[in-house]
Image: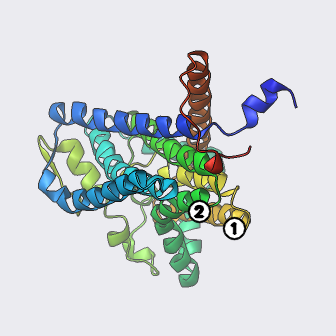
């Protein structure tokens, strides 16, 4: 393999991937701090006190790992702290994006699905006819947070730490891109726009599952919207963050030998569940996959650029060799 080909296919080093994750995390913080004062969305920070306590515990454990030279513990706690905080900030950013109150695009998204030959109502009725499938769809849909929590741990344990950092950085970039798209392409989702009645679905309580729509409408119309984390939920329709995350998790898990095929199959299943449980159009899923792939590519390119710039100045951080990816 030529030097150029190797540079394109190898995993960036630990220092560059950690820098990428921290930079994107900092960007999320900046956008929330800059956007909240000029938007209709207001947040009572006391609502986040419990989350703050958990973050403090993670940070203390991270510092303990650094002082005791326990690099795996330090990295796991860093990934968990950033992952937890970023998940909360992702929801906050989606509400800020919705507050721009751009015209709804459900008719456009339905036309895309129609062009693809996909009928959401028929799909929903087929899924709803199987309580067993509905149950597992809900499990798959809810697994996103668990995967973001545990896949990085497994990667760090098997000495693929840079891949764990790329995974989380890609998730953050996915959220940022998705929120930007959502500003211009808000939608109430396939269930409400399909004209279906809640009584037509027997295996789920539709009013409870698709209860994020009132939140979306409220943040769009209110002069001042009080963000309440306890009631907040994912309100992004286009693109599907779940689908993008599924692709990122499948990519990251491909280096975990024992479970890589299971993770790929499970994340395909999670993507399918998102159409039903998340009230997504099929096009939301396809664009979510595309944005997820773009996020991975963008993070890898940025890390390699950072490496090249660092190497030119000979300001190289001593590598943690035992936790570097081999390829």
Seen at 23% across and 30% down, the residue is: 34
Q: Are marks 1 and 2 in contact (CB under 8 Å)?
A: yes
Badge 1 marks a residue whose secondary structure is: loop
Badge 2 marks a residue whose secondary structure is: helix
**Residue pointed to by mark 2:** 154
Q: From the viewer's perspective, is residue 8 above or below residue 80?
A: above
Seen at 60% across and 61% down, the residue is: 157
- Residue 309, image quadrant: top right
Q: Position of residue 42 (x, y in %)?
A: 15, 44
Seen at 36% across and 40% down, the residue is: 104
Q: From the viewer's perspective, is residue 282 above or below residue 262?
A: above
From the viewer's side, name the closer residue of 236 and 50. Answer: 50
From the viewer's side, name the closer residue of 58 and 236. Answer: 58
From the viewer's side, name the closer residue of 310 and 293. Answer: 310
Q: Residue at the far front: name it.
A: 68
Q: Position of residue 223 (x, y in %)?
A: 12, 40
Asked whether the viewer can see residue 232, the reply is no
Instruction: Give the number of the disc on residue 219.
Output: none
Q: Residue at the far top: name it.
A: 313
Q: Position of residue 310 (x, y in %)?
A: 56, 22
From the viewer's side, name the closer residue of 288 and 61. Answer: 61
Instruction: Give the number of the disc on residue 259.
Output: 1
Q: Whole-Å distance between the Cαs marked 1 and 2?
A: 10 Å
Asked whether the viewer can see residue 292, the reply is yes
The answer to whether residue 192 is left or right of residue 131 is: left
Quadrant containing the C terminus is top right
The answer to whether residue 294 is left or right of residue 97 is: right
């Amino acid at each position: 393999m030529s030097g150029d080909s190797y540079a394109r296919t190898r995993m960036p080093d630990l220092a560059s991937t950690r820098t990428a994750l921290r930079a994107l995390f900092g960007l999320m913080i900046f956008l929330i701090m800059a956007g909240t004062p000029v938007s209709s969305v207001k947040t009572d920070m006391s609502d986040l006190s419990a989350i703050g306590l958990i973050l403090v515990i993670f940070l203390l454990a991270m510092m303990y790992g650094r002082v005791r030279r326990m690099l795996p513990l330090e990295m796991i706690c860093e990934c968990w702290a950033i992952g937890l905080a970023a998940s909360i900030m992702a929801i906050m950013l989606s509400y800020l994006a919705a507050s721009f109150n751009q015209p709804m695009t459900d008719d456009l998204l339905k036309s895309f699905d129609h062009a693809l030959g996909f009928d959401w109502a028929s799909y929903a009725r087929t899924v709803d006819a199987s309580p067993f499938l509905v149950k597992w769809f809900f499990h798959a849909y809810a697994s996103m947070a668990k995967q973001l929590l545990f896949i990085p741990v497994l990667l760090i344990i098997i000495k693929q730490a840079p891949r764990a950092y790329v995974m989380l950085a890609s998730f953050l970039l996915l959220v940022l891109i998705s929120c930007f798209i959502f500003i211009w392409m808000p939608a109430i989702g396939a269930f409400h726009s399909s004209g279906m009645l809640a009584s037509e679905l027997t295996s789920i309580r539709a009013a409870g599952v698709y209860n994020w729509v009132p939140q979306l409408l409220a943040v769009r119309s209110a002069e001042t919207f009080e963000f309440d984390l306890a009631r907040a939920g994912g309100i992004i329709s286009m693109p599907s963050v779940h689908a993008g995350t599924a692709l990122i998790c499948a990519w990251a898990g491909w280096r975990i030998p024992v479970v890589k095929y299971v993770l790929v199959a499970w994340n395909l299943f999670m993507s399918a569940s998102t159409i039903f449980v998340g009230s997504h159009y099929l096009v939301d899923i396809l664009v979510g996959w595309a944005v997820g792939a773009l996020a991975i590519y963008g993070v890898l390119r940025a890390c390699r650029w950072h490496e090249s710039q660092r190497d030119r100045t000979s300001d190289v951080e001593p590598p943690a060799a035992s936790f570097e990816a081999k390829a």
